Amino acid sequence: MIKYFFSTEKEQKHKKEKDHSDKQHPLIDLRDAWKTYRTGTVELTALMGVSLHICAGEFTAIMGPSGSGKSTLMNILGCLDQMDSGTYYLNGNDVNNISQEDLALIRNQEIGFVFQSFNLLNKMTLKENVELPLIYGAISGRERPRRALKALEAVGLTSWAQHRPNEVSGGQIQRAAIARAIVMDPAIIMADEPTGNLDTKTSRDIMDVFNQLNKKGSTIVLITHEKEIAAYASRVIQVEDGKILQDSSNRDDSKPEKTN
Ligand code: ADP
């Protein structure tokens, strides 16, 4: 059953229920996921019976060559697309056969997305960009600036809040995109090749931000094709030909040191 409501009273009740620290049930519980794309007479099965559990506090990288099914898996995990068969519980909610409207609500409440292409609006300041999910999430106008500034502070951008994306660096734009992803206090942060447009030094800075958020309790799922980026995660899942080939934990001593 979906536990999402619009009224203020019910929102508050939901907030109390929204406890991401419960390590007993997995935040992501995907079982036997199948997905086939049909273009004309051509059929391509991108996911072949994928099962995956991710618990609160994990930092997971999904790796694999181009065409292996990473984005398809991420789209399903992120409620951006639905599978043909299988079951999916996200933070205890059955998100399998629900309406597009409810899916949009779950995306807003439960998932913070970070993309390679940043997707910030140039006409708005960083703070206004970070406030956008709060507007969609019906958070009051009085509350929004406080929460946006708190999220910007968490990524080290307090003094840049009033700047527009075209006045800051690529790394700062991605930091702002991370602030936008965490501002609703989502159960999971999902990042799709978040360092794909950044140089090596800036990529390390951004991965340090994810590391810090994970240390403070955020659950992170990251798609990457780069080993050096996956090395920041504590768990690495290898996808190939629509299947999970390997699921392994990264030893702490093999993780990169914090860079300055
Ligand atoms: P990856 O993210 O690992 O590159 P994808 O999930 O994008 O892999 O793609 C997996 C397979 O599904 C590929 O063969 C791709 O061509 C195919 N595919 C992905 N999206 C579509 C689509 N919308 N229509 C048809 N085929 C698709």
Image (cartoon, rainbow, N blue to C red):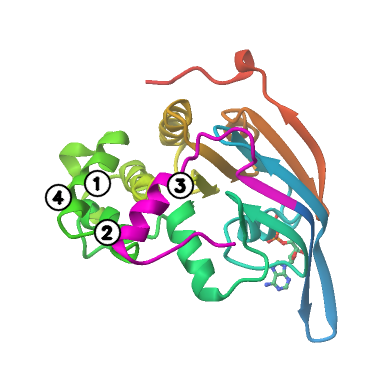
Q: Are marks 1 and 2 in contact (CB under 8 Å)?
A: yes
Determine the secondary structure under disc 4. Answer: loop
Please name the residue that numbered disc 1 is placed on.
Answer: 147
The amino acid beneath tag 1 is Arg
Residue nearest the observer in this picture, 170 or 78: 78
- Disc 3 versus disc 1: distance between alpha carbons? 20 Å
Mark toward the viewer: 1 or 2:
2
Residue 214 in picture, x, y percent from top left? 48, 31
- Disc 1 versus disc 2: distance between alpha carbons? 10 Å
Residue nearest the observer in this picture, 111 or 240: 111
Residue nearest the observer in this picture, 201 or 118: 118
Number of the label disc, if any, that sits on residue 162: 4
Is label 3 within 8 A of ligand 1 (CB to nearest ligand atom)?
no
Q: Is residue 41 above or below residue 4?
A: below
Magenta-colored span: 1-30
Q: Are marks 4 and 3 in contact (CB under 8 Å)?
A: no
| Mark 3 burial class by Cα count in 10 Å: few <14, some 14-19, many 20+ | few
Mark toward the viewer: 3 or 1:
3
Q: Are marks 4 and 1 in contact (CB under 8 Å)?
A: no
Please name the residue that numbered disc 2 is placed on.
Answer: 139
